[in-house]
Image: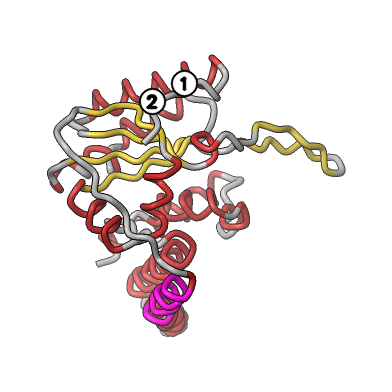
């Protein structure tokens, strides 16, 4: 895997240094990998005028954190202080995935193309030297299609079912149950998208993180829930917490 960031301008290299410093302070990562557009060199930092509106397009910093211990994953994925600090000191969005080295290596050996692409295109930002990555197996086109078809057929119908159950519970006035079912619908449908597009399934039940990961693949995902007003954001936070709170 590459280790050089020479293809990035000094400002971006400095931002990545700050990201690494914050991640190291949050837990005990064994490896920190930059992947996606900033690793490939095709990131976007652009402002465009459409009608009377000014749109700011910025590619995410896609960061993959590997740790030997599963119990350390939450230090990175469910750490609100880390999320806030990243938002404060880094202008571009940071999309962070944390995983165990065991699971990552199993995915490489199985030929999961998302993980293979991370290995091929990624840039190592930090390496403790305590883990070794497996050699990936290359999947053929037919194998890939078979795999993503199976993922879609498993997850998408469940999402539709939860959505229908949410509407039925709402109609009957079972508001907490409706909120829980709606949360599950969003979780299952965004998981479907991530599995089909990347073969990656996030851990946990944070739909905000799932939507951020989906939006990094297709900007239309960022338009699914309005977040323009305080009331919009309050309602989305209620839905985000419904997995635990509504139960």
Residue 89 in sight from this viewpoint: yes
The secondary structure that dominates the magenta segment is: helix
- Locate residue 49, reporting x and y percent: 82, 37
- Residue located at (48% from left, 24% from top): 90
Characterize the local packing of mark 1: few (<14), some (14-19) or many (20 or more) Cα atoms within 10 angstroms: some
Horizontal arrangement in the rendering, residue 191 relative to residue 126 (left or right): right
| Residue 63 pos. (x, y %) | 39, 38
Q: How crowded is mark 2: few (under 14 residues within 10 Å), some or many (20 or more)?
A: many
Q: What element carries label 2?
A: helix
Residue 136 screen position, x and y as percent: 31, 54
How many angstroms separate mark 1 from mark 2 (CA)? 6 Å
Give the answer, above or below, for where 232 lies relative to 187: above
Residues at discs 1 and 2 in contact (Cβ within 8 Å):
yes
Q: Which part of the image, by quadrant, shows the N terminus? A: top left
User: Residue shown at 62%/57% (left/top)?
Assistant: 220
Q: In which quadrant of the rendered view does residue 201 lie? A: bottom left
Location of the C terminus by quadrant is bottom left
Q: Mark 2 points at which residue?
A: 19
Tell me which corner region of the image, top left, top right, bottom left or bottom right, holds residue 43: top right
The answer to whether residue 170 of the structure is visible from this angle is no
Q: In this view, does 18 lie above or below 244?
A: above
Q: Is mark 1 on a helix, strand or loop?
A: helix
Report the front residue among 240 and 90.
90
Magenta region: which residues? 142-154
| Residue 54 pos. (x, y %) | 77, 36
- Per the image, the residue denoted by label 1 is 15
Which one is in front, 227 or 158?
A: 158
Above or below for 201 versus 230: below
- How does the figure colour the protein chain or chains? secondary structure
């Amino acid at each position: 895997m590459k280790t050089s960031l020479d293809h990035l301008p000094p400002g971006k290299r400095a931002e990545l240094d700050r990201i690494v410093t914050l991640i190291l302070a949050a837990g005990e990562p064994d490896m920190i990998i930059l992947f996606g557009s900033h690793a490939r060199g095709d990131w976007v930092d652009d402002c465009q005028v459409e009608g009377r509106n000014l749109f700011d397009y910025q590619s995410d910093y896609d960061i993959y954190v590997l740790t030997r211990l599963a119990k350390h994953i939450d230090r990175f994925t469910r750490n609100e202080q880390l999320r806030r600090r990243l938002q404060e000191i880094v202008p571009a969005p940071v999309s962070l995935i944390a995983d165990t080295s065991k699971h990552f290596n199993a995915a490489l050996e199985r030929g999961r193309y998302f993980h293979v692409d991370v290995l091929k295109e990624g840039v190592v930002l930090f390496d403790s030297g305590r883990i070794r990555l497996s050699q990936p197996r290359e999947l053929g086109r037919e194998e890939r299609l078979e795999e993503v078809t199976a993922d879609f057929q498993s997850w998408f119908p469940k999402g539709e079912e939860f959505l229908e159950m949410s509407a039925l519970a709402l109609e009957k006035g079972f508001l907490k149950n409706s909120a829980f079912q709606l949360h599950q619908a969003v979780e299952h449908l965004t998981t479907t998208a991530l599995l089909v597009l990347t073969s990656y399934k996030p851990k946990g039940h944070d739909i905000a993180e799932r939507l951020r990961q989906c939006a990094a693949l297709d900007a239309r995902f960022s338009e699914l829930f309005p977040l323009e007003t305080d009331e919009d954001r309050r309602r989305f936070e209620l839905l985000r917490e419904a997995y635990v709170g509504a139960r």
